[in-house]
Image (cartoon, rainbow, N blue to C red):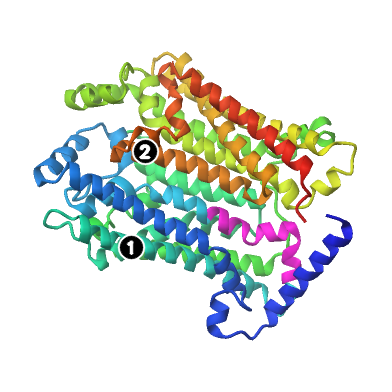
Amino acid sequence: MSADGRSAAAAGRSAAVVRLGRSQASPVGRVVGLGSLFGKTLRDSRRAALIVGGVLALIALATASQLSSQFSSEQARREIVGSVSQMPAIFRGLLGDPINATTLGGYLSWRTLNSMPLFLGMWSILALSSTLAGEARRGSLEVLLGTPLSRRSIATQKVAAHLVAVAIAMTIAALGLIVTGATLGTLPGDAISPTAAFGHMAWLFLMTILGGAVAFAVSPIVSRSAAAGIGAVVLFGSFVVSSFRASIPAFEPLSQVSFFRLTDGHRPLAGVTDWPAIALLAAVIAGLLLVGIVTFARRDVGRPVSLAVGRLPRPAFTRREPFGRMLGDRAIAVVAWGIGLGLYGIAVAASSGSFAEQLKSIPRIEEMIARIYPGVDFSTAGGVLQLIFFSFATLLFALAGATFVGGWASEENDRRLDMVLSAPVSRAGWALRTGLATYVAILLMTSIVAVCIAVGAWLAGSPVTAPFAGTFVAGLYAMAIAGIGLAAAGAWRPGTAALITGLVGIAFYLIDLLGAILGLPAWITDLALTKHLGQPMAGMFDVAGIVACAGIAAGGLAVAAIGLQRRDLRG
């Protein structure tokens, strides 16, 4: 796009924003997006709200269908819950406590909804970390502040719109739960009342907002990516320390401040409630959102505070060359993700000895796991990591890759690429160099995690080679997911790159997870790339899947370069 075209577009946006601040649209029109910043933001979020609510309802329906067909009697349900209750604590921690899981509502709460805040929380984190910081970085917020809207009103309307969008998604999910209980409930107690459905969705609503509220509170002070990282650390850290506190003693003190542990007793679908804990969580979230609004109203626009301690000298190549500059800009994120995932991995690996002892004491469970993972030696750290760590780690690696891809796409989203391409560098050359830097960032993060896991295996007295090498398979998988995001940015829009990367990673994880739970056909479960990685932590590699990951990563980078060469930059 030419300079005159960009100027005209900017002028048009400015005029639209001024009209937005002064419009006297009707109340209904303001809600649906006419003449109201709240309405416009809510309108922009409508698809995400409908998709999230619909997917939650479908997951509940599919899980209930499987339960009613395979475990139609109360005795059968008692047996499956009893067998899981005998599993080692480190395994039970990932599923949560099976409260009244012999009922349909209790089973849905335990098997599908307990971990949903991890996925839905990323939606809120990405939305609330960028709603102010992203616009400030692009310069559009300064235009918005030129309208009669006050800073406090802008922040409040944007936050309110996101809260309403999440509430819409939870309402759709609650209605789906009610319908599921009415149509698929086969035993006494299977019916799901509106009070139970909406009470449970109140918990999920707050847990979804939690990480985003943390990101929003710090976004006026730090950069968008740093705010998202802080929100993700609070969300995932809270889940990990709560889930593994029974098997990893070092997590017990930290779990006292975990919001997952705080709300453990509120499971209305299972017939238990803890409204005081929910009220406390709501108060914390309200306080965080208020801090974000007040801080935004008091601080200068677009002047983030660096979280780096001191200043490390940067090599000259990181300032002059696209590859080095892109890699240098991702350095803090690489270290943060690497250490965070590494600490999680080292904790699981170091506790593998106690897990193996507990597993041997329950022959029935040991036989069941052996059927699922034939040939895996669960007396080693590699076997335990494959069972407990690897699947969840592929999700986290994919989300880390999404943040790196988001940094790559921000060059164009934030209009720095126009200046970069004024230098003697081709579009395709820039895309290839910076795309490779994104892959190297993932590789460096993986190296940090691999070293931590090797240390954990060594502390447990187990072989370190297999889990060390297996970690790099997860890293290669993250590169493949990142390649899909790069391809989307090159062929379509850069603004979708991080979102598509994250959604693909979550989709593959859910297909793999729900495929085992629901007994889905092989042609569906085989769509997940995670099904084609083998059991690498235990030293069993799927060569075809690994080659496919490498091919997807290379192909995605090529599509990004070709796409950028052929299309106009985003204006």
The image position of residue 115, as x and y in percent, is 37, 47
Quadrant of the image containing the N terminus: bottom right
What secondary structure is found at the residue carrying circle 2? helix
Closer to us: 484 or 566: 566
Q: Which stretch appears magenta?
A: 125-144
Residue 349 placed where, x, y %?
Answer: 41, 25
Where residue 37 sits: x, y (%)? 62, 73
Vertical relation: 354 (above or below) 114: above
Look at mark 2 in the image and give the residue it sits on.
513
Residue type at mark 2: give it: Leu
Give the dominant element type of the magenta stretch: helix, strand or loop: helix
In the rendering, which numbered label is found on residue 174? 1
Marks 2 and 1, how far apart at CA: 22 Å
**Residue drawn at point x = 29 percent, y = 45 percent:** 111
Q: Which badge, 2 or 1, comes first in the chain's sequence?
A: 1
Splitting the image into 4 quarters, where does residue 266 fall?
A: bottom left
The percent position of residue 429, horizontal first and vertical second, equals 80, 33
Task: Locate residue 510 relative to residue 72 in the image: left or right.
Answer: right
Q: Is residue 33 left or right of residue 88?
A: right
Say which of 567 and 263 sits in front.
Answer: 567
Label 1 neighbour load within 10 Å: few <14, some 14-19, many 20+:
many
Q: Is residue 137 magenta?
A: yes
Crowd tier of the residue under label 2, counting other residues whose Cα lies within 10 Å: few below 14, some 14–19, many 20 or above: some
